[in-house]
Amino acid sequence: MNNISTLVRPSIAALKGYSSARDEFDGLEGIFLDANENPFGNLNRYPDPYQRQLKKQVSQWKNVSEANLFIGNGSDEIIDITFRVFCEPQKDKALILTPTYGMYEVSAAINNVALVKVPLTDHFDIDLAATKKALENTDIKLLILCSPNNPTGNLLDRNAMKHLITGFNGIVLIDEAYIDFSTEDSFNQWLTSCPNIIVMQTLSKAYGLASARVGIGYASEEIIGYFNKVKPPYNVSGLNQAAALATLKANDVYESQKEMIISEREKLKVALNKNALVLKQYPSVTNFILAEVTDADALYNALTAQKIIVRNRSKQINNCLRFSVGTPEENEQLINALHTLSI
Ligand SMILES: *Cc1c(COP(=O)(O)O)cnc(C)c1O
């Protein structure tokens, strides 16, 4: 394992981050005449740039020290910052295992970083030999592992992940956007033994807060320090921090919603299995099901005409649609529509 400081882009290592008014004085009481805010109103003050209250809650909830936490404006921001901290444009490369979440490719392109793609196996698991072979390319600075994977819905093999994480000399970004739906342990307990990992979760999926844009990053203190230098000073709004805090305090509600979503997923699975338009479905530990259908474009259009919007993934995986699990009523409407459609 290389030292983290040797993996950071030289311009970022040398960067002196912006020092905001709230960096220079972080007390809560006083007459604040330092940030050119309007003194009237209740959203008039800049929020805590380091989201300390929220981190305190997340720390207790996830059993990770506050110093190892980063809150992003959605986890999409964490993906972008990872590229910006570690990948020198037009020089370093990143490796992804396809098919996977589309934002990795977009973030790489925005940052002018070339992507190496290694296909997952037929069961959408890690092809260890091919991945290790690809990682022999020393330009690869960043490896992204999405587990559970989107849009396939499965966990990647944990031993293969461990093997890649411990054998790689660069940074590994582990995207756990759907981990809360599964019983799998997070890699966020691995920060000490594997200082080269960044683990990423989100409140957008299991915790019902997609609108608020709150992503959670877990990494070594050193990596968090670089992230803090690179992020916009007030990257998570005060409204969003408050929404996240309220959500974590009402954890029970989300635990029962999660159970409901999982039991609905199992019902949907049974119904899809019986449907002649569905040729195959892939096992899911998430809140969606990927299914191969007879004609993805035609079925997508027919469902859309009935105002049922699913995700057409047939460009990534031949004839596949991705069905998010909805409310019991919504799922029933989907199942009824699939029964009556003739395409
Ligand atoms: C939805 C999703 C994200 C984005 O989450 P936000 O926190 O809403 O930005 C990240 N990764 C994967 C795999 C996702 O499916």
Image (cartoon, helix red, strand yellow):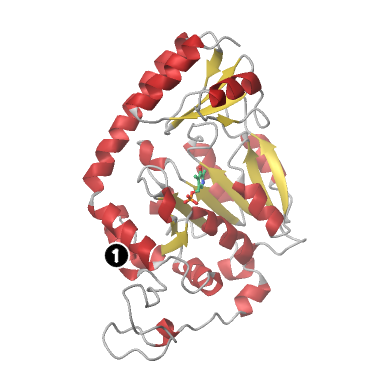
Ligand 1 within 8 Å of the CB at mark 1: no
Q: How many marks?
A: 1
Q: Which image quarter: residue 117? A: top right
Say what amino acid the circle numbered 1 marks.
Lys
SS for dot 1: helix
Could you say where residue 334 lies in the image, as x and y percent from the top left? 44, 21
Q: Which image quarter: residue 267? A: top left
Badge 1 crowding class, 10 Å Cα cut-off, few under 14, some 14 to 19, many 20 or more, is some
Q: Residue at x 52, y 37 (%)?
A: 149
- From the viewer's perspective, is residue 7 above or below residue 116? below
Residue bearing mark 1: 56
Could you say where residue 258 lies in the image, as x and y percent from the top left? 31, 36
Foreground residue, 76 or 145? 76
Q: Is residue 192 left or right of residue 258?
A: right
Could you say where residue 126 lies in the image, as x and y percent from the top left? 59, 35
Q: Residue at x 27, y 56 (%)?
A: 246
Q: Is residue 71 left or right of residue 300?
A: left
Q: Is residue 329 left or right of residue 229?
A: left
- Quarter of the image for the C terminus: give it: top right
Q: Which residue is drawn at 39% across and 26% down?
A: 330
- From the viewer's perspective, is residue 129 above or below residue 207? above
